[in-house]
Image (cartoon, rainbow, N blue to C red):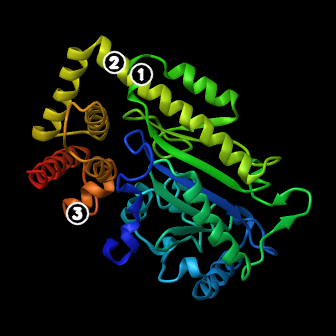
Amino acid sequence: MIDFSLLPDGGTRWLDGSGEHAEVVLSTRVRLARNVEGFAFTSRARDGERLRVLGQLRDAMPKVESLKGGVILRVDELATPDRQLLHERHLVSRELAGLDGTLAVRTGAALVLADEVSVMVNEEDHLRLQAMRSGFDPLGAFGAATALDDELGRFVPYAWHGEFGFLTACPTNTGTGLRVSVLIHLPGLVLTKEISKVLAGLQQMGLTYRGLYGEGSEVVGNYFQISNQTTLGKSEVELLDQLSRVVRHVVEREEEARHVLLRDAGYIIEDKLWRAYGTLRYARSLTFDEAMNYLSGVRLALSLKLLSSPSVYTLNKLLIHCQAAHVAQYDGRATLSDGDASVARARFVRDALAADVGSHG
């Protein structure tokens, strides 16, 4: 299994619960799609070409300030449980990890993880430069990603067209190659049945929403990923401004919905949320969906001041560590049956919440 203590912050600094609107927005991610000039796009490249792309990045790392002290993980050399762990930490996509069931892991697939940024190598594009921040911080994430982009671009020639901008495997990324996404928690809008209107409004504004793990994933626990759909024809500033304005509006709508719930159905909501907390504290078996839904309730209770603990950080940690590969790692095994995973998950949640209560006296 991967020893995450060897990685910068274990790759999960974005879980710390800091940043603007941290009770509603869990994280902000900026991703820049880049391809290396002179090579076929990843899906059409030969193994040797993908390895040469990885070699160019490896050679550039000591010269790139943003990547100094970083580590390279050869995803194509990792066992399935380790690749699953990286995916559950939002460090790699299902495609790069070979978890989508359609393609094996590509030769040359890798992850470069540094202090504040990371790079997926040989995913849909040769390079996916990434920066994640806790809470709502699009400018901070964009600043880190563009700093890496500028530094790396001095040593690795990007595929560029004078009219179209950065060339990418998918036409929707061509231009800036910028994808900004926020992971947001919207239980108030779901419970007040306003969520459909809000999501329809996002699409009218040129944004899209997905589940906890982006494209192809289901919405669970009232967690949504909101991101821009296209990049061609707009500048980075325009894309950031549009997403920022829309997300701030969604946050306002969510906060209003939470106040409505507390005002109009206070006892019902309070009972529902305390039951969620009690179940997490004492349950002996929890499926993943059950854990996500109960954690959603506890997060809502915390924001409504119905609970003083656990901390936002503990809830963020549980969001990641309740997933299958992390539960198996906690239990000391490579994989677990669904039944064993449910028992181990419940035990991990009980321990984490008990430790949080102890740390708060």
Mark 3, mark 2: which one is toward the viewer? 2
Whether label 2 touches label 1, CB < 8 Å: yes
Between 63 and 56, the one nearer to me in the picture = 63
How crowded pointer 2 is (Cα within 10 Å; few <14, some 14-19, many 20+) is rated as some
Between 67 and 53, the one nearer to me in the picture = 67
Give the Cα distance between marks 3 and 2: 42 Å
Q: How many marks?
A: 3
**Label for residue 261?**
2
Residue position for label 1 = 257
Q: The residue under label 1 is which amino acid type?
A: Ala
Q: The residue under label 2 is which amino acid type?
A: Leu
Q: Is residue 183 above or below residue 108?
A: above
Mark earlier in primary sequence (3, 2): 2
How crowded pointer 1 is (Cα within 10 Å; few <14, some 14-19, many 20+) is rated as many
Q: Position of residue 166 (x, y in %)?
A: 79, 61
Residue in view at x 56 percent, y 44 percent: 215
What secondary structure is marked by label 1?
A: helix
> Residue 98, can we see it?
no
Give the Cα distance between marks 3 and 1: 42 Å
Judge from the rendering whether residue 17 lies leftward or rightward of residue 49; answer left or right. left
Residue position for label 3 = 333
Residue in view at x 30 percent, y 41 percent: 288
What secondary structure is marked by label 2?
A: helix
